[in-house]
Amino acid sequence: MPQISVVVSADAVAGGPDTRARQVDFAPAPLIPVPFADSARESAGAAPTAMLGRLAALPRERLESFVAQNPQLVAHLLLRPPTARDVSSWWAGLDTSARFDLMAAAPQLVGNLDGIDLSVRDMANRRFLSQQIAALEAQLDSGVGRGVAVAVDGTLHMLEEIAKALRTDAGEPPRTLVTLDTQWPGRAAIAVGDVTTADYVSFLIPGMFFTIDGQVGDWADTATVVYEEQNRWLDRLEGKTDQGRSTVATVAWIGYQTPHLLNIGSLSLAEEGAIFLANALEGLQSIREGDQPHVAVLAHSYGSTAAMIALQDSGFQVDALAMVGSPGSAAQSAADLAVRGGKIFVGEASGDPVVNTAFYGSDPGAPGYGAKSMSVAGGVDAITRAMLTGSHGHNEYFTPGSESVRNLALIGIDRADLVSVGGDPGEKAGKLLLASR
């Protein structure tokens, strides 16, 4: 496989001002025996933070061979990672050289540890993505059996879909690859805008039938729709000032395997997704220490069930939760969820066969649950006077120009006071807003 190189700024990796750049080579290193016995077995039994310490202590050439010979350790670390705060402390304690070495030898590890700066994770994930695409193409070119070729070609197509989802045209907001699992069926999270500086960050969580191979590009585009809607509202509400206005970022988060018809009856994927989502939310709070953004979770269908599990008995809080097309909650009421100020909203479209089923527990749309209702029926926006489309069935909640997207965007920028609850969209809120001017 050919050598892949990238020139990265030392400033991004070191976390401090540095105008130098350094070339990092991502070619596989030759296998060199690791010079201490049972290192893999010892590391496998170590605590996650201790495992990171052992890896960082290895010289570059030994680190490359160790990771190449023991890929299961990286997989183990990513399935059971240290806390984001522990990762952040560990990363901060490494010098620039050690960070570069880890990025070169284990980009898949650096790219997926919550608690590391997202610009660094993006560089590592993009390099690992390129590596894996090149390796799969080489495997196909080398000649493999028909069965193997089908599997390899499927995985290659999935990774190419991620690569396409990362492309942007001139004038579009940047996209950051903050999560990458290249093993079929894959996992990925793509941020739209700058999560590290945004005043408002919204995580979009999909439900059943969403796959990396089929929908990663569409979901990233949906995150862009919400991002643009939020910016339009901020332009209207804050205007332009010398100091600028608030900023937003959205995250198209397919960080878990969503269910299909054969496994939709189980909560196991939601529980697994809840762990990954909780890690991602804690990771954001860790890297934004001292400058916390307003964080909203905007979840659809089975994704809302996973989100509510993540927010039940958690050690952190988010600022808002909005659910559309929810099939039920393991939590008994909104009071059981770690959402500041009880800013929990539920939208239910006409003809949606999933809502009101309470298939996975309590119905978050029921009056007794304690969540607030948001309208998705459509109508004339009383503030902008724009015609908003209504959502019907289970899959129209994120349609551009819909009342649903309007309300989701407002929840994400902490303007729940403008969320419409029925009748003309935003009628009551619009009158209050106009009266205040």
Image (cartoon, grey):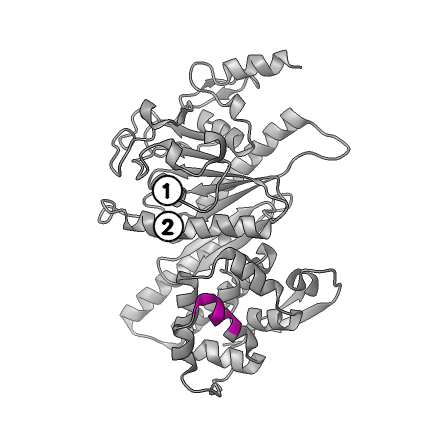
Q: Which residues are magenta?
A: 47-53
Q: Nearer the viewer, residue 32 or 42?
A: 42
Q: What residue does disc 1 label?
A: 303
Q: Is residue 249 above or below residue 363?
A: below
Q: Main secondary structure of the magenta part?
A: helix
| Residue 85 position within the rendered picture, expressed as x and y whole percent measured from the top left | 53, 56
Identify residue type, mark 2.
Gly
Q: Is residue 287 above or below residue 416?
A: below
| Residue 359 position within the rendered picture, expressed as x and y whole percent measured from the top left | 24, 36
Magenta region includes residue 48: yes
Q: Mark 2, residues whose alpha carbon is within 10 Å: few (<14), some, or many (≥20)? A: many
What secondary structure is marked by label 1? helix
The quarter of the rendered structure image containing the C terminus is top right
Residue name at image x 42 percent, y 22 percent: 375
Identify residue type, mark 1.
Gly
Magenta region includes residue 282: no
Q: Is residue 388 left or right of residue 243?
A: left
The reply to whether discs 1 and 2 touch (Cβ–Cβ < 8 Å) is: yes
Q: Mark 1, residues whose alpha carbon is within 10 Å: few (<14), some, or many (≥20)? A: many
Name the N-terminal-most of marks 1 and 2: 2
Residue name at image x 48 percent, y 27 percent: 407
Q: What residue does disc 2 label?
A: 273
Q: Nearer the viewer, residue 193 or 412?
A: 412
| Residue 226 position within the rendered picture, expressed as x and y whole percent measured from the top left | 52, 36
Does the rendering let one see residue 152? yes
